């Protein structure tokens, strides 16, 4: 049976991967993880259950009674004690959909969702703080927890964006000031912090800083949850007939359509939602499991078949040595299994309780190879090693192979998936079974590939990435740097140990043939020579573990060899202090499998304790299983593939796809000191300053202040390895894509011309240079959005597109006099050399407003000045008439 047949059969057997799924009308496999930084408080579990239960009712109502929360699993930290917790299986903090953790400095207790994908793409996770769940006073500020959960769920699952805006809370439309909102029917009033009517700015005539929109407590509309979930009347999402396309919010900028439309046409659930029928009765209450992952239990299942002979068995030994020596935690349990014609247990589960235990396991690693590749024998024996006395399988398998299975892999993989073990798979070379990726995907494991290029060090990087974070990053290893060189002379370099790391610092050097001369020097000049460095002769690996906390600064290594051979250096460390998390890097692709129809995007997050690190240099290396590599500089410029500027998420489209599997590695460096921490807030559950009740403003408690000042970041370097991915497109060459959609178009009217600015797209998404631009405008936003080609054309004959990523700034004369109070709408399309056009850009709005030297206070909604004057006149006439009648009556009485 060939590998393609195996893959198809396996896919048919396995319904879907780990992660959220719809089971009928109910969402299942929702994982809510509590960070290990949170002290034990069992009431949090009850609060989580209450939020999800009430959220299920709101979710059911919000989407025409089609969906609800059916099952959820709560993962508690390893240090919490209770007999009521069952053992976790595939659940982990890192892959949880909802996290309960200490506050993000930019948000405080405000719930938010980490979201940086395209419109309609699933987000990363929802973040709630323990205080948000416990403090009932926050309900008045943000709304009921259940409804806030639905607001964030819409970000997480359906990829919609917020309909309010902290940066542009007001806009000018048809001569009136409006609050950025959806629906168009939300009513309220404008007041400053002292509850006085807001003043307008003399230049923009928009409300001055400090002005707030206070919604009426009781509304005549039921939407939208993405604007103000705290309003009692709000119970659903904005639909097309009520959507406010003019509002300068992220939903319009990123999606350009109503929230309801995105959910039913663009989200991961679009097909299911269109076919599901509403539930005729109220949904059942969700069911919950409370699970816990204690110490790690890992079994290495290693290929020793004939194709592993030579450099492959050595590299496997080197990578596993690094894992056992540096990566796996103290008190974890590790077993070792090998397989070829038969499977063999080299070590049963053994607790890592000392350095000598690590050494014993390293000595047991396989050194010779021969025979055929019987995958199922190795997999089944690995599961037996993990099996408890009661038949339960709890733990992880790290499964490495380089060849196609000699046995029927389909006969054992489904049972392995059902076992409950996390199975991480590593494919060495381009012949490894195609089912490895699916097996990892279905069990919550990670999938890595490694080519035969020794210098890329992919195999060691894959093993280094196999950690199980619990939310406390001070206890997780970080990879500082990694380098390789083939030489017959010197291999010199510098490893920068920054201020945030230093404990458990290690330098791992691998060589190919003969032990080189090695010297490592600390920043203060202390030198570690060969005699002080541990040598694993059979693994051709040398390790220096720096005692105590490594001195911050530049550590220099000098390696000299007299014969030509490949050398690699890898440095890892952990946090210097228990109360200061290190700078960390996470990287991933937006797709683990691509058929070429949808662009692939590389992402890298750089942060420290949720604080984003901006203005640093980030490079991604994407290496195919054949060994060819491409390098991309990832950008945080808010254009092309990058969703938001200066948010610490660096992105780039990957267009030069190659068929087959590829690995992903990212290197981050800040050697010039330009990087900064930022606590930039982008979205989150909207804070409401108060409500208008019967014409009176009722204030909510003030929102706790958060720091918004960028902080300096010291010099640092990091490397990170993401999961590998697979590409299989039709034909021999990768598909061509049109220029990327422009998402940052802005417009400003200057007398009788308009000034437009945007970031240039490329010929192929965000690469190269587009051929031309087509710019159009209209008085009618809807017309421009739906009939771009019929709108007025702007003459762009003098505009030659700049290279992708450049800032385009141009003034255009529209050949007519623009009157005061006029609002115009603009949009752009780009075209490449194959005449393929991009999607229409975001729609930019510009109004001509002549400065008012004496701006007045804003007339609040409902107090239209004309109506007010007429009303006053009527009242005066009535009062005058009443006074005349009263005077006449009194005079008549006096005469009588």
Image (spheres, helix red, strand yellow):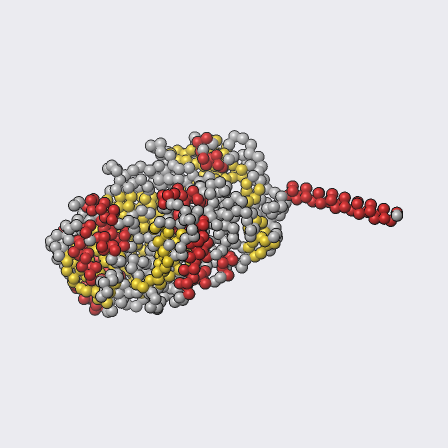
332 relative to 156, above or below: below
870 relative to 399, above or below: above
385 relative to 816, above or below: below
| Residue 729 horizontal/vertical position (percent) | 26, 40
Residue depicted at 40% across the width and 43% down the height: 264
In the picture, measured across the screen, residue 305 lies left or right of residue 98, that is: left
In the picture, measured across the screen, residue 195 lies left or right of residue 780, that is: right
Do we see residue 161 in this rendering? no
In the picture, measured across the screen, residue 263 lies left or right of residue 334, that is: right
Do we see residue 609 in this rendering? yes
Residue depicted at 30% across the width and 65% down the height: 294
| Residue 886 horizontal/vertical position (percent) | 80, 47
Residue depicted at 57% across the width and 35% down the height: 819
Residue depicted at 29% across the width and 59% down the height: 89
Q: Residue furthest right?
A: 896
Which quadrant would residue 131 be assigned to in this image? Answer: bottom left
| Residue 785 horizontal/vertical position (percent) | 45, 36
Of the 4 image quadrants, the one containing the N terminus is top left
Tag count: 0
Q: Nearer the viewer, residue 157 or 746?
A: 157
């Amino acid at each position: 049976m060939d590998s393609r047949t195996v893959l198809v059969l396996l896919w048919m057997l396995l319904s879907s991967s780990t992660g959220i799924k719809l089971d009928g009308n109910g969402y299942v496999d929702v994982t809510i993880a509590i960070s290990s930084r949170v002290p034990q408080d069992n009431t949090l579990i009850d609060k989580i259950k209450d939020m999800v239960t009430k959220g299920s009712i709101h979710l059911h109502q919000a989407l025409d009674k089609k969906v609800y929360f059916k099952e959820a699993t709560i993962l508690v930290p390893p240090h919490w004690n209770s007999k009521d917790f069952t053992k976790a299986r595939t659940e982990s903090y890192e892959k949880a959909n909802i996290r309960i953790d200490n506050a993000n400095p930019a948000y405080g207790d405000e719930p938010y969702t980490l979201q940086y994908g395209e419109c309609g793409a699933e987000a990363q996770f929802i973040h709630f703080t323990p205080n948000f769940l416990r403090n009932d006073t926050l309900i008045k500020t943000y709304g009921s927890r259940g409804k806030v959960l639905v607001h964030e769920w819409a970000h997480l699952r359906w990829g919609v964006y917020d309909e309010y805006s902290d940066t542009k809370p007001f806009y000018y439309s048809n001569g009136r000031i409006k609050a950025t909102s959806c629906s168009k029917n939300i009513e309220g009033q404008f007041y400053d912090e002292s509850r006085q009517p807001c003043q307008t700015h003399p230049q923009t005539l928009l409300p001055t800083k400090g002005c707030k929109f206070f919604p009426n407590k009781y509304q005549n509309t039921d939407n939208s949850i993405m604007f103000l979930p705290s309003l009692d009347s709000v119970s659903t999402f904005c639909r097309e007939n009520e959507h406010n396309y003019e509002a300068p919010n992220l939903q319009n900028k990123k999606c350009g359509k109503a929230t309801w439309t995105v959910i039913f046409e663009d989200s991961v659930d679009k097909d299911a939602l269109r076919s599901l029928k509403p539930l005729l009765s109220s949904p059942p209450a969700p069911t919950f499991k409370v699970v816990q992952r204690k110490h790690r239990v890992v079994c290495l299942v290693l290929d020793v078949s004939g194709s592993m002979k030579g450099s492959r068995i050595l590299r496997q030994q080197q990578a596993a040595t690094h894992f056992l020596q540096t990566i796996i935690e103290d008190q974890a349990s590790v077993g070792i299994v090998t397989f070829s014609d038969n499977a063999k247990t080299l070590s049963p589960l053994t607790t890592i309780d000392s350095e000598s235990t690590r050494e014993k396991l390293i000595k047991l690693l396989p050194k010779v190879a021969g025979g055929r590749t019987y995958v199922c024998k190795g997999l089944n024996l690995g599961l037996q090693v993990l099996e408890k006395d009661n038949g339960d399988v709890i733990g992880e398998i790290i499964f490495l192979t380089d060849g196609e299975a000699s046995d029927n892999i389909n006969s054992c993989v489904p049972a392995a998936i059902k076992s409950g073990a996390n199975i991480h798979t590593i494919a060495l070379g381009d012949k490894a079974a195609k089912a490895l990726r699916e097996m990892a995907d279905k069990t919550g494991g990670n999938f890595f590939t490694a080519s035969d290029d020794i210098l890329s060090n992919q195999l060691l990087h894959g093993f280094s990435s196999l950690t199980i974070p619990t939310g406390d990053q001070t206890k997780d290893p970080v990879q500082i740097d990694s380098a390789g060189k083939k030489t017959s002379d010197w291999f010199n370099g510098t490893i920068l140990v920054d201020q945030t790391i230093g404990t458990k610092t290690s330098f791992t050097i691998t060589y190919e043939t003969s032990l080189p001369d090695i010297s490592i020097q600390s920043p203060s000049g202390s030198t570690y020579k060969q005699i002080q460095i541990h040598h694993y002769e059979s693994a051709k690996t040398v390790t220096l573990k720096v005692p105590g906390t490594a001195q911050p600064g530049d550590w220099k290594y000098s390696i000299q060899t007299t014969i030509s051979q490949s050398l690699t250096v890898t440095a890892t460390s952990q946090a210097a202090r228990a109360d200061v998390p290190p700078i960390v890097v996470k990287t991933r692709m937006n797709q683990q499998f691509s058929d070429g129809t949808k662009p692939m995007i590389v992402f890298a997050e750089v942060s420290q304790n949720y604080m984003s690190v901006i203005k640093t240099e980030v490079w991604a290396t994407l290496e195919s299983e054949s060994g060819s590599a491409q390098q991309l500089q990832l950008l945080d410029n808010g254009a092309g593939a990058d969703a938001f500027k200066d948010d610490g998420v660096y992105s780039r489209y990957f267009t030069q796809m190659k068929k087959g599997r590829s690995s992903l590695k990212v290197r981050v460096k800040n050697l010039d000191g330009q990087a900064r921490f930022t606590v930039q807030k982008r979205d989150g559950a909207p804070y409401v300053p108060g409500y208008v009740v019967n014409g009176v403003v009722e204030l909510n408690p003030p929102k706790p202040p958060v720091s918004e000042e960028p902080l300096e970041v010291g010099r640092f370097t990091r490397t990170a390895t993401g999961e590998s991915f697979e590409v299989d497109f039709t034909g021999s060459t990768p598909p061509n894509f049109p220029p990327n959609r422009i998402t940052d178009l802005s417009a400003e009217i200057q007398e009788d011309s308009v000034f437009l600015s945007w970031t240039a797209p490329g010929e192929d998404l965000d690469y190269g240079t587009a051929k031309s631009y087509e710019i159009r405008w209209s008085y009618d936003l809807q017309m421009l959005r739906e009939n771009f080609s019929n709108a007025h054309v702007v003459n762009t004959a003098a505009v030659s597109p700049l290279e992708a990523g450049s800032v385009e700034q141009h003034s255009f004369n529209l050949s007519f006099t623009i009157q005061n109070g006029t609002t115009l709408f603009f949009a752009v399309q780009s075209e490449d050399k194959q005449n393929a056009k991009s999607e229409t850009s975001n729609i930019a709005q510009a109004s001509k407003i002549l400065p008012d030297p004496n701006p007045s206070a804003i007339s609040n909604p409902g107090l239209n000045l004309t109506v007010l004057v007429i009303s006053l006149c009527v009242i005066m006439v009535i009062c005058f008439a009443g006074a005349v009648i009263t005077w006449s009556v009194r005079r008549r009485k006096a005469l009588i």
